[in-house]
Amino acid sequence: VAITLIGCFEMSNPDNPAPSLLRSLASLLGSTAVGAGAFGAHALKETLAKRPNGPENWKTAVTYQLFHAAALLALSALSASSDVAAYKDKSADGMGNYATAGKMMAAGTVMFSGSIYCLTLDVGPRKLLGPITPLGGLLMMSGWVAVGLAR
């Protein structure tokens, strides 16, 4: 976890910080997904079994989080291979690059999976957390659309 947190502050190329940012987000989401999966399979096994659809909901959250961590890693590589001048041009309007897609996916993943974790464990107000799940899903979908639109 310490290596992950240190990586969050690393910016290897000041002209194009997107690869480092996306790689750090991928590392953070990936490592916490593995931890959440292990925690759910062992420490929370009995707790989740007592909740309606608890194990299935937890597995859904972990799966989406891990899948999108891998997607962020791929976007980091794509962003690193893109032209730095093009990165600057495309980021001026805030759209049309892999970094934007990655940020949307990362935010959506935190909202989607995070709210499912909380709802499954009955942590926090359901009225607030309930709508966060589909909003997170919409952000993840928007991130995928942004990948298709990236130039």
Image (tube, helix red, strand yellow):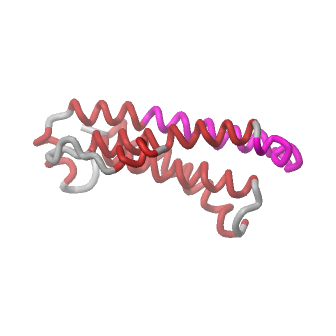
**Left or right: 71 in relation to 41:** left
**Left or right: 126 in relation to 64:** right
Q: Main secondary structure of the magenta part?
A: helix
Q: What residue do we see at 56% from left, 57% from top?
A: 135
Could you say where residue 81 lies in the image, as x and y percent from the top left? 22, 30
Q: What residue do we see at 36% from left, 39% from top?
A: 23
Residue 102 quadrant: top left
Q: What residue do we see at 49% from left, 46% from top?
A: 140
Residue 36 quadrant: top right
Q: Nearer the viewer, residue 32 or 62?
A: 32
Judge whether 130 appears above or below 46 on screen: below
Could you say where residue 132 lies in the image, as x and y percent from the top left? 60, 60
Q: Which residues are magenta?
A: 43-71
Q: Nearer the viewer, residue 139 or 7?
A: 7
Q: Quadrant of the C terminus?
A: top left
Judge whether 35 appears above or below 89 on screen: above
